[in-house]
Image (cartoon, helix red, strand yellow):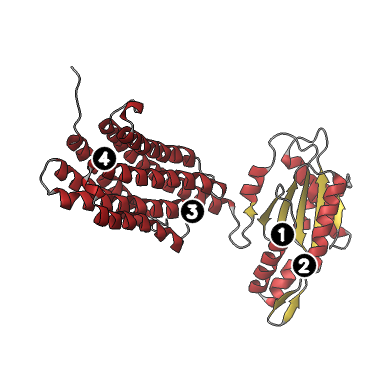
Amino acid sequence: MTAQLDLATVLLPHKSSFLVGALCFLYLRWQSPRNEGLGILAIGFLFLALASTLAGYGEQKLLPAFLWTLSSFTLGLTGYALFWIGLSRLSGQRRQRTDWLALAIPLTGAVVGLITHFHVVNYARATAFNTGAFLFLAASAFKVVWDRRDEPLPVRAIFAASLAVGAALCLAVVVGLLKPAFLPVTTTYAFFLLIISHFAIALFALVLVKERAEAALRRTADTDMLTGVGNRRWFLSQLPRYGFEGDALAVMDLDFFKRINDRFGHQAGDKALIAFAETVRANLRSTDCFARLGGEEFGLYLPKTNEVQAKAIVERLRLAIEQLDIRFDGHRVALSVSIGVVAGRRGERSSEELFSMADAALYQAKDAGRNCVVAYASPPASFATNISSARTG
């Protein structure tokens, strides 16, 4: 025996899926008020729930056709337009006034309906509605994928896939209405599959917000709050686990930084640290890793860089720092940096080894008068016991 689903029966869970989705978006909006678009998504799903309710009553002959056909069509298409606006903002976290132009589509449909009365013809109304739904869902899927360039969250792929499936189902309904022979399932079953798609969309929106919050926490944990560059924890995580052959490591220490704090105050010192970090970061390659290790000490990892190249890079940085014009209360704050650099060679396997060598080179730079670059060379034995003192000047 084959069970048959009538459209009026399917519209009940169809409406429920929108209500559950709206509640989900409202809850997310309450828990994550900084995420753009969640409130608009909730309103869009509420519009779709209302449209589905009117259509259900209409299919059961509980409402006059002239009332429910145009109203459910307009409310539903407006719901999908609001869904697109909300999803666009949630995905990109940007407000754009042009997003509201999407409402021109349901408005145009309503005006055309008032003029032509196409909405009273079931297949014409359903074709127009599902065509609009297809466009909004397909655009939403594209938007989620497009924004992955700026925010590569893992959930984006499956979120976009769920939106694309919803768009494909709406397109299948259109095909089924125009060419029934080309559609392997009935329109009613396509609607039933859409219900699952709506739940999936709400679920993956929740996961998107969750992953975004986790990524923000990781950035906070890995970022030096004063300078905006990575911190020691992040820097160590970027270093290769095995071997530094062909790479270089530099340790940089601002000269006489304590004197800046003593003479001009800690605000001037903070300003100097920020200017230093911004200058270094602006002069690095995209593959280089730069971080504040603590106090006035910074680390720089240069992948695929030999000793000659590394010395040239850090010397350029030293000159850029020396030429900085930092002003505080009308006074120029002179800044210079001492840099120890070491290139990885065969047999040097750990970051601890290279840090020790870079520290030794930094000590040599300070011992040589500061404001210079020194590449690692085997230091006298006395250097090994005094490396830590290089960090105090």
Mark 4 or mark 3, earlier in chain? 3
Total number of numbered labels?
A: 4
Q: Residues within 10 Å of mark 4 (few under 14, many from 20)?
A: some
Q: Whole-percent x and y of residue 37?
A: 39, 56
Secondary structure under badge 4? helix
Side of 345 where 18 appears, left or right: left
In which quadrant is the C terminus drawn? bottom right
Q: Amino acid at mark 2?
A: Phe
Q: Which residue is identified by label 4?
A: 123
User: In front of the other: label 2 or label 3?
Assistant: 3
Query: How far is disc 1 from disc 4 in space, using C-alphas?
Result: 60 Å
In depth, the one of 127 and 271 nearer the eye is 127
In depth, the one of 232 and 304 nearer the eye is 304
Mark 3 or mark 1, earlier in chain? 3
Q: Residues within 10 Å of mark 3 (few under 14, many from 20)?
A: some
Secondary structure under badge 1? helix
Q: Amino acid at mark 3?
A: Gly
Q: Whole-percent x and y of residue 83?
A: 36, 51
Does the CB distance between marks 3 and 1 fall below 8 Å? no
Instruction: Choose top left, top right, bottom left or bottom right for residue 40.
Output: bottom left
Does the CB distance between marks 4 and 3 fall below 8 Å? no
Mark 2 or mark 4, earlier in chain? 4
When the figure is inspected, residue 305 is found, relative to residue 37, above or below; the finding is above
Identify the residue at image location x=84%, y=62%: 370
Q: Amino acid at mark 1?
A: Ala
When the figure is inspected, residue 356 is found, relative to residue 99, above or below; the finding is above
- Does residue 180 show up? yes
